[in-house]
Amino acid sequence: MKILTCPLNGPRNISEFVYGGEVKDMPDPNTCSDKAWADYVFYHDNLIQIVKEWWLHAPSGYWFIAERHTASDEIIKTYDPSEIYNTRIEFSTQQEERA
Amino acid sequence: MPFSLLKYGLNKDYPFEKHADLPAPCELKPSYDVVIVGAGGHGVATAYYLAKYHGITNVAVLEKGYLGGGNTARNTAVIRSNYLTNEGVKFYSESVKLFQQLSNEFDFNIMYSERGQLTLAHTDAAVRGFRQRAEINKHFGGRTELIDPQQIKELVPCLNMNPADMPILAGLWHMDGATARHDAVAWGYAKGATQRGVELHQLTEVTDIDVENGKVVGVKTNRGNIKCGCVVQAIAGHSSLLAAKAGFKLPISTFPLQAMVTQPVKPFLNPLVSSPSLHCYVQQTSRGELVFGGGSDPYPLYNSRSTLDLKESLLANAVELFPFMANMRLMRQWAGLTDMTSDYSPIMGLSPVDNYYLDAGWGTWGFKSTPIVGQTMAQLVASGGQVPDLIKPFAMDRFDSFAQVNEMGATAASH
């Protein structure tokens, strides 16, 4: 059994978690080009290195970030997303302006 | 010991020069018209058709390991064309046709065995999907029928019709479904290609791609640098890593896929049986072993390690289908790396770098496409970048124009 340490619930079997993709900056969907949006949605670095990834602890519905090596599968650390995303991003305002 | 045998043993020419299937290793030339990266089935098939149909023989196939030693040797050797989209069915049907006469073409037995493939539906939605797939297949000349539980019982008498309390409602019976010896496919193509003058360089790893003014001009390897007219990348499982060296990203995530075989038993299972709802497929090899495969692992990883979690979940379902298998012993387990695209279709054709051709994104559907990939990639290379109609829908830029070819519903074991 592989253990993943959830920042909220502590060490748990990795089968309780759902992988959510690489952490990347989302372009503003209201202003970015189709190509930039396709890049964000479909294209991935997918390299052998330590990556930042979204993970969900399914039973508690809690999303967090894990740093993991994509060849050794070693989980370096896990933390709450607020460590990276600590400011509010307003997309709706720009949509209203456009409308 | 007979003296003739001893004589052969002491003879310097034997067995290598006269009897070897592949020529002896040689030095790399300073330049080639075509460099193919990866000597798996796809790479050597491309080289074979380049030499056979287009007379292009100044070709080097570079392989960091050994011939057919990657995912060509790790797949579960299923050949079928019962896909979902017009584009997919047309493409895979051509591949099945080529497979059928490949032993004759090579004069070497690839052990092609047409057993038929049976996919099971446990839900009404799956039955609807099967109806669509059967019709599309028939339209493009395939042999596929929707069959009822009585017919399934006749085909596979030992199948549990109520596995995991999900009764089998119908089956997609694909008579063209087959299996073949995957190593033999790579060997046959490699032999045919090298006999026509193509160079196969094993233990030759491409360490970098030389790109000048948006055009590929050469590759660096652990055995020296070479110039080239064009490059074909055919390295399933590591596509993103090489593309990064050429300077671009791919719409691919790489997941391991685990498979395993049991001890051999007497023949009892002729068709290949798969259940997307139970995430597994089962087939009996001609040696009598049962091969089990399932979906890819739940998260990306460049590692072919095996996990107990996946064994348990996959085999629990396989045992539901065939309860008497519960006491059989597993003999081997392994994993391959699957380059998954989000629409479960490959990426073939042009790349952002000129003269750099892509054969990537082969997820769990690579082996069955080997011959047609060879033919179409050879056409693409020989024409200097004119993409054949058959593979136009699989261009990488379909992701930029949101024109995916969705084959997710046609996987043998949903991922």
Image (cartoon, rainbow, N blue to C red):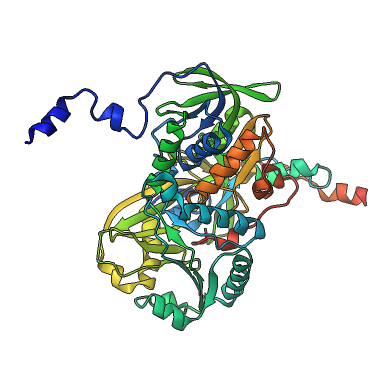
Question: Observer-nearest residue: B310 or A95?
Answer: B310
Can residue A45 be seen here? The reply is no
Residue B121 against residue B74 in the figure, above or below: below
Left or right: B94 in relation to B286 = right
Residue B125 against residue A21 in the figure, above or below: below
> Residue drawn 36% across and 61% down?
B312
> Residue drawn 71% across and 43% down?
B397
Residue B85: percent from the left, percent from the top?
64, 60
Q: Quadrant of residue B125?
A: bottom right
Q: Quadrant of the N terminus of chain B?
A: top left
> Residue drawn 68% across and 29% down?
B354
Residue B256: percent from the left, percent from the top?
46, 48
Residue B21: percent from the left, percent from the top?
34, 35
Can residue A52 be seen here? The reply is yes
Number of numbered discs on residues: 0
Residue B275: percent from the left, percent from the top?
47, 68
Left or right: B397 in relation to B194 = right
Question: Observer-nearest residue: B137 or B284?
Answer: B137
Q: Quadrant of residue B26?
A: top left
Q: Residue furthest left?
A: B1
Residue A4 against residue B262 in the figure, above or below: above
> Residue drawn 17% across and 29% down?
B8
Q: Residue furthest bottom?
A: B150
Question: Observer-nearest residue: B335 or A21?
Answer: B335
